[in-house]
Structure formats: C-alpha cells, structure tokens
Image (cartoon, rainbow, N blue to C red):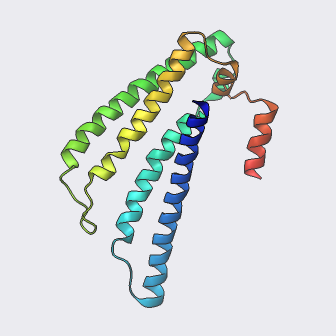
C-alpha cells in the first residue's frame, strides 16, 4: 500500500513537471514565432492557461500531501505538545470544512460551465472547473486522514513536530540540499 501511495504521488509530480514543460514550450515557442516569423500558434495561449490552472490545483494537492502549505509556526512551536495537537485538530477541521465548501462550489460551477467552451480550442470549461474536484477531494482526504490519526492517538510525533515547524537534522539537511 505504501509503495502504491509513493507511486501515485511520484506520478503526480511527473504530471506537474510535464505541465510546466508544456507551458514553457507553448509560451516560449509562441514568442519566438511572433518575433522571428510574425506568426504564432493561436491555441497556445489558451492551452497554456489551462495548463497553468491544472498546475496550480494539482500542485496544491501535492503540497498538502507533503504538509508544506504555509503555516504560522512561531506560535505553535512555543506551546506544549498537547496544545500543538489541539491546534492541529482545529486547523485540520477548518481545512476540511473549507475543502468541503470548495468541492461543493466546484460541483456547482462544473454543472454551470460544462456547456461553455473555450473560444479558440473549443474545449469545454468542464476541464478547467473539473480539476477542482481532484484538488479539493485530495486535500479533504489527506486532511481527514491526518485528523482521524490525531483524534485516535495514532498521529506520529514527527507529524506534530512538522506542523509546529520543528524539523529533524535530516529534514533540515534535505531542505538545504534542495535550496543550494
């Protein structure tokens, strides 16, 4: 099961890299065509916009999986472990509520916009609004699983420390190696 989970998230990272590459190629290629040959690919801007939306929403789910969304850790790091756990539970409850509201709004927007089409490519806007179902659903599921672990006492100390911004020496070394 753990291998399948790793394979899934590794595949999602590959999709994110592919989306960035596609965006780069379309935008850069279009710039070259416009300035060097006074032409361009009409659908390039529209498809790169679609790719950017997908990149943003899929990336949000990947970041939630890694527990790397922005946190205000200065307060959480200064309280006891029991208080940290309470803050994590409250934070996850709010994130779960927001995810459910986001999913509900996405579902309504998807129904409204499914019959609207992009002007150049003719692609249904369901492809834009539909990615919110993946993102909101993934974030809700990730948050719900951590919330269940926290409420049942199965939350690992490392997860609670990461929530508070307290990292092990190995994690600090990994962060430094990625930024250098």
Horizontal arrangement in the rendering, residue 39 relative to residue 88 (left or right): left
The residue that appears at 52% across and 53% down in the rendered structure is 16
Does residue 68 show up? no
User: In the picture, residue 171 is in which quadrant?
Assistant: top right
Q: Examine the rendered structure and indicate whether residue 132 appears above or below residue 122.
A: above
Residue 169 in percent (x, y) is at 81, 32
The residue that appears at 27% across and 60% down in the rendered structure is 123
Q: Examine the rendered structure and indicate whether residue 24 appears above or below residue 31.
A: above
Residue 100 in percent (x, y) is at 36, 28
Horizontal arrangement in the rendering, residue 50 relative to residue 75 (left or right): left
Does residue 16 show up? yes
The residue that appears at 55% across and 56% down in the rendered structure is 17
Residue 157 in percent (x, y) is at 69, 18
Horizontal arrangement in the rendering, residue 85 relative to residue 176 (left or right): left
The residue that appears at 27% across and 37% down in the rendered structure is 107
Q: Camera-side residue: 109 or 14?
A: 14
Residue 93 in percent (x, y) is at 46, 20
Query: On the rendered image, what quadrant is the N terminus found in?
Result: top right
């Amino acid at each position: 099961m753990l291998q399948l989970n790793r394979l899934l998230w590794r595949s999602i990272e590959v999709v994110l890299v592919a989306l960035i590459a596609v965006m780069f190629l379309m935008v850069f290629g279009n710039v070259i065509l416009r300035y060097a040959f006074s032409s361009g690919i009409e659908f390039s801007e529209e498809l790169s916009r679609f790719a950017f939306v997908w990149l943003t929403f899929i990336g949000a789910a990947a970041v939630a999986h890694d527990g790397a969304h922005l946190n205000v850790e200065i307060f959480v790091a200064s309280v006891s472990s029991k208080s940290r756990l309470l803050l994590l539970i409250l934070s996850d409850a709010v994130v779960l509520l927001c995810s459910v509201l986001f999913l509900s709004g996405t579902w309504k927007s998807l129904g409204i916009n499914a019959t609207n089409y992009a002007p150049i490519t003719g692609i249904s806007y369901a492809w834009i609004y539909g990615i919110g179902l993946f993102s909101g659903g993934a974030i809700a599921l990730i948050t719900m699983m951590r919330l269940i672990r926290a409420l049942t006492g199965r939350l690992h100390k490392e997860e609670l420390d990461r929530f508070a911004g307290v990292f092990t020496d190995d994690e600090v070394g990994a962060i430094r190696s990625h930024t250098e």
